[in-house]
Image: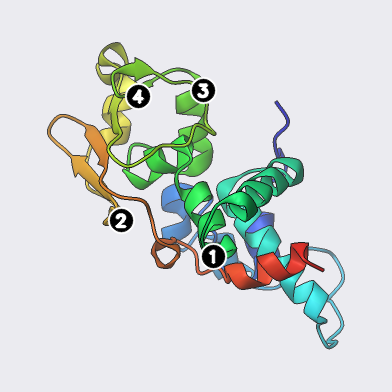
Amino acid sequence: MARYTDPVCRLCRQAGEKLFLKGDRCYSPKCAVERRRRAPGMLVARRRRGSEWGTRLREKQKMRNTYGVLERQFHRYFEEALRTPGVTGQMLAQLMERRLDNVVYRLNFAQSRRQARQLVTHGHFTVNGHKVDIASFIVKAGDALAWKATSKQKEFAKALTDGIPGRPVPTWLRLDTENLKGEVVSLPESGQLEVRIDTRLIVEHYAR
């Protein structure tokens, strides 16, 4: 499975804002965006007027990097959103939020989406009582997510879930901190994203 292997902090510096790719580090003074606000690279970029195409591309890259998907997979999500009745940008944001690895992260079961993807692919979670090890699995309203019984007893799981709640859990999810379970109460809205993204620019990018 192809994946991005370079330092993820470079992606935040390219975007010029935090994409929350490294968990708790993003909230600390060690965050790369706080320490070095300029874009990565040895040479200082010349000031020049940004094009509309560049603006739309940066917005698309920001969403793609936030959720940790590569270009071909992201384009498939866009095509699916295009076929879904409703506003295409909102449907795209909804699909990305409904990925299982993102739901695990949003429920505070992992410190970052990258860590959540690893936990899912290693088979540590169940959806409606069945083990699911596909990070791109799309949840739907009414789905119940939980740690697998054997995984919940392991030391790494206890370390990850110690101190829950951490980040605020979005309103479309419900977290049971005592039993370490989550439920998809409703489908997410585009305004409930962790990172501010203008989905309209992404639609314009692919419609060019």
The answer to whether any part of residue 80 appears in the image is: yes
Q: Tags 2 and 3 in contact by the CB under 8 Å rule? A: no
The residue at 87%/83% (across/down) is 46
At mark 3, the secondary structure is helix
Kind of residue at badge 3: Thr
Give the alpha-carbon distance from disc 3 to disc 4, as whole Å. 15 Å
Residue 152 shown left or right of residue 191 in the figure: left
Of the numbered discs 1 and 3, the one sitting upstream in the chain is 1
Q: Which residue lies at the image location 51% right of the left edge and 28% below the top edge?
A: 118
The residue singled out by tag 1 in the image is 87
At label 4, which amino acid type do we have? Phe
Residue 162 lies in what quarter of the image? top left
Residue 5 in the image, given as x and y percentages of width and height: 71, 38
Q: Which residue is mark 4?
A: 156
Location of mark 3 (residue): 121
Residue at 30% from the left image edge and 56% from the top image edge? 170
Please tell me in which quadrant of the rendered image residue 190 appears.
bottom left
Sequence-first tag of 2 and 1 = 1
Look at mark 2 in the image and give the residue it sits on: 170
Residue 197 rendering spot, x and y as whole percentages? 55, 68
CA separation in Å, label 1 and label 3: 31 Å
Quadrant where the image shows the N terminus: top right
- Number of numbered discs: 4
In the foreground, 139 or 21:
139
Tell me the distance, in whole angstroms, between the alpha carbons under discs 2 and 4: 24 Å
- Asked if disc 2 and disc 4 are in contact, CB closer than 8 Å, the reply is no
**Amino acid on which the number 2 mark rests in the picture:** Pro
Which residue occupies the foreground of this view, 27 or 134? 134
